[in-house]
Amino acid sequence: MSPEDAARLAGLLHAARQVGCLVDLPADARLPATPEEAYQVQAEIVRRSGEAILGWKVTALKAEDRAAYGGTRPVAGPLLSGWVFPAPAEVPLSRFIAPLLECEFAFLLGRDLPPRETPYTLEEIADAVAALIPAFEIADGRVPQDLPPDAPGALRLADSMGNGAFIPGTPVTDWRALDRAGPVTLTIDGIEIETGSGARILGDPLKAVQYLANAQPLCAPLCAGQIVTTGTATTPVRLKRAGRVEADFGAVGRVGMG
C-alpha cells in the first residue's frame, strides 16, 4: 500500500469518526489487505488527529481468528486520547453509529515493551504492569457491512479496530492476587443485563497483553503509561438509549458511565 493510498484512506476514516457516520469509500480506493498495511493507515490517522495514543485494544488472540485480518498474529487498534473518558463518564450516544458496550479487564503498563526476538514470558509481562483497571469499551466501527468478503478484516483493523470510546475505572496497583477469571456483572439502570468472566480471555486476560507484546510491531510502540484492554468479558450489549451503566468486576472494582 503506497503512502498516498494510506493517507487517503486515513483521511476518510478519520473524517467519518469525527461526525459519527459510516465511511464513504470511493470505487478506486485502495484497501489494506494485511495487518502491516492496516497499521500504515492507523499511523496516518494518529498523525492527522494530533491525539496521543493512550492505549491499545487487542483482538485475534486465537489462531483461528487471525486470517480474517490477513495475518498470522494478534492485532490491535490504538485508543486515542480524544476518545478516552475516565469514569464516571457521560458519553453522548450521538457520537456513535451502532455502539456496543463491552466490559473489559485492562492493564496499565509501567514500563516500555519494545519489540524483540525473544518472546516475552507471562512473568515478564506481569512485572511490566503497573495496575489493573476495570473498564468499558464502546465498540463502534465506521466500516460498512456490504463490502467484498476479502476487504472488511484489515479495513476494520485500519479503523482503530472498531474503537468508539474507552472508559477506564480506578487503577488497582496491588493487583497480582486478584481474581482475573472471576465474574463480571453488567447492570443498566439497576437491572442486571449480562454476567461474564475474565476467563473468556484465554483463561486469564493478562495473557492478552503477553500475546500483544509478542505480536509487534504495531503502528507505534507499546510504552509505559499506556493501557492494554484485553477483550470483552461479557457478551456485547447494544446501547440504544442513555442510562446509568455499571459493571462490577468483584475485587478488581467497579466502573460506571451515564
Image (cartoon, rainbow, N blue to C red):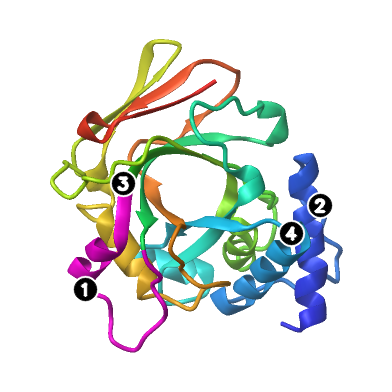
Regarding residue 151, the answer to whether it shows in the image is yes
Give the farthest residue toward the top.
190
Element marked by disc 1: loop
Element marked by disc 2: helix
Q: Quadrant of the N terminus?
A: bottom right
Kindly identify which residue carries mark 2.
15
Q: Position of residue 3 (x, y in %)?
A: 77, 81
Residue 121 vs 134, above or below: the answer is: below
Q: CA distance from mark 2 to mark 4?
A: 13 Å
Q: Amino acid at mark 4?
A: Gly
Q: Earlier in the sequence, mark 3 or mark 1?
A: 1
Q: Amino acid at mark 3?
A: Leu
Regarding residue 22, the answer to whether it shows in the image is no
Observer-side mark, 2 or 4, equals 4
Observer-side mark, 2 or 1, equals 1
Q: Quadrant of residue 164?
A: top right
Observer-side mark, 1 or 4, equals 4
Q: CA distance from mark 3 to mark 1?
A: 18 Å
Q: Earlier in the sequence, mark 1 or mark 4?
A: 4
Q: Earlier in the sequence, mark 3 or mark 2?
A: 2
Q: Which residues are magenta?
A: 111-131
User: Which residue is at a point 17% across and 50% down the rendered structure image?
Assistant: 176
Kindly identify which residue carries mark 1.
121
Q: Quadrant of the C terminus?
A: top right
